[in-house]
Amino acid sequence: MASNRLALVVGAGIGGLAAGVALQRADWHVRVFERAESPRELGFALLLAPNAVSALRAIGVADRVVAAGVVPDSGEIYGTNARFLRAFDTTALRRVLPDPMAVVLRPALHGVLMDALGADALVLGRAATGFTVRDGRPSVVLETGDTVEGDVLIGADGVGSAIRRALHPDEPPPRSSGLWAIRGVAHDVERWLDGFSGATYFLRGIEAGLARATRDAVYWYMSVPPRLLRDGRDPAALAAALVVQFDERYRRLVFATRPADMRLDELFDRPPLAEWGRGPVTLLGDAAHPMLPHAGQGAAQALEDAATLGDALADAGDIPSALRRYEATRQPRTRAITALSRRNARFGSIDNALACRLRDLVLRFIPDALFVKQYVAVGQRPPLR
Ligand SMILES: Cc1cc2nc3c(=O)[nH]c(=O)nc-3n(C[C@H](O)[C@H](O)[C@H](O)COP(=O)(O)OP(=O)(O)OC[C@H]3O[C@@H](n4cnc5c(N)ncnc54)[C@H](O)[C@@H]3O)c2cc1C
């Protein structure tokens, strides 16, 4: 019934590509419009929480993505002055969650999704500026002035979404958290890894981490307040100035990273929308619910959106009703995780010396079972409907 229906997706990030794959599996034709001339995914690497891997499984690509990355089997936690606080065995999580966590290079995830979608479905170098709806059918309006009509329109165009702006013209722009992220990937560093999976650091005002992303590459990141960025906006120079506060391993990995493999981003989110879409138009991923990265869930939530959308639109009779069902399923979870990300960001940004000592104590003595419980609450596969 649905096989001659056309879904228009704006944005070929992780969310838009995954939505395209999910909709093809639900027997839709798909066109994904991407403003960039060549498909790319910057940011170097990504922690895919177990629920992200479950969502990838729902759209049929989990095994390929996991095979391209690393499944961590342990984690270490460091506190003030990069002092070791504890180690954490992730095998307990693997026993209770349906899928593992994985760390992957972003281009690897992007490549698997693009392969699954197929080049014919991708329209590059086409920025959308908005949409129109006539007789219940949406058309995407492109920067060139061209329009393309379809049966459903999905805005997956990221935190500054043009489709969101067209749906909600009075909404204020995304809000800055005041935090910045420096990220990088160190390649060819296997000789220093020796069984290492990953580590999280809670220093004064800085939350940071290391995660092995392939046999010989490590992803590192730091969340930094603006007072520490006084020396400019060059990620390599900033990272070099900040790593003096870290341990030898972190320093070594940052200094082994080529400047071209680092980036600096200001971190934004948005208060949740009461209504995501209207009629045959909806939003997905960061366009719908941009969140701070401190819960490691932005891409996971975009992937869950995609799986849920595919399910809602499979054999959908009335498209607007199916989209409102999708939104009603996704809104409570993404709202809760956006709030969790803010709370985590506050926890990770604690700067006061005494409060940092207290945080160290909490991190050191909190029972493993509580860690696992917290993680399982987010990492569990959510219902699709
Ligand atoms: C520092 C940092 C670390 C992170 N770490 C993690 C992590 O470890 N785990 C995790 O799950 N998440 C993480 N995230 C979040 C994750 O990166 C995002 O949530 C995810 O990439 C969102 O995907 P998306 O497809 O919705 O949006 P985007 O990735 O923003 O993709 C949007 C796409 O739309 C295109 N586009 C934009 N405007 C238009 C237009 N008008 N017309 C056509 N195309 C357009 C863009 O070029 C882009 O390709 C992190 C984020 C940051 C900032």
Image: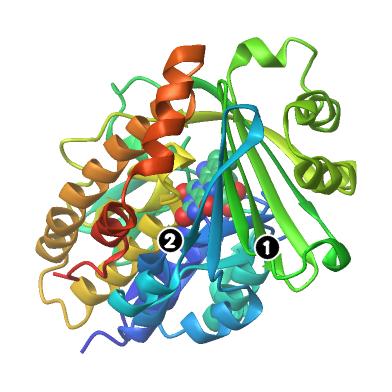
The circle drawn on residue 9 is 2
Of residue 336 and residue 42, the one placed in the foreground of this image is 336
The disc labelled 1 sits on which kind of residue? Answer: Arg
Please say whether residue 240 is visible from this viewpoint. yes
Give the secondary structure at mark 1.
strand
Q: Point out the image quarter for the C terminus.
A: bottom left
Residue 305 image-quadrant placement: bottom left
Q: Residue at horizontal 81%, vertical 42%?
A: 248
Horizontally, residue 346 falls left or right of residue 210, namely: left
Observer-nearest of 190 and 147: 190
Instruction: Single out the mark in the foreground, 2 or 1.
Output: 1
Dot 1 corresponds to which residue? 212
Q: Is residue 277 above or below residue 355?
A: below
- Say above or below: 263 vs 72: above
**Corner quadrant of residue 260:** top right
At label 1, counting other C-alpha atoms closer than 10 Å, the crowd grade (few under 14, some 14-19, many 20 or more) is: many
Residue 341 is situated, as x and y percent measured from the top left of the image, at 36, 38
The answer to whether 319 is drawn above or below residue 229 in the figure is below
Q: Nearer the viewer, residue 367 or 108?
A: 367
Between the residue at mark 2 and the residue at mark 1, the CA separation in whole angstroms equals 33 Å
Q: Is residue 328 left or right of residue 35?
A: left
Mark 2 near mark 1, Cβ–Cβ under 8 Å? no
Q: Quadrant of the N terminus?
A: bottom left
For residue 303, side relative to residue 102 (left or right):
left
Q: Residue at x 60, y 69 (%)?
A: 109
What amino acid type should be assigned to the residue bearing mark 2?
Answer: Val
Residue at 36%, 72% in the rendered image:
92
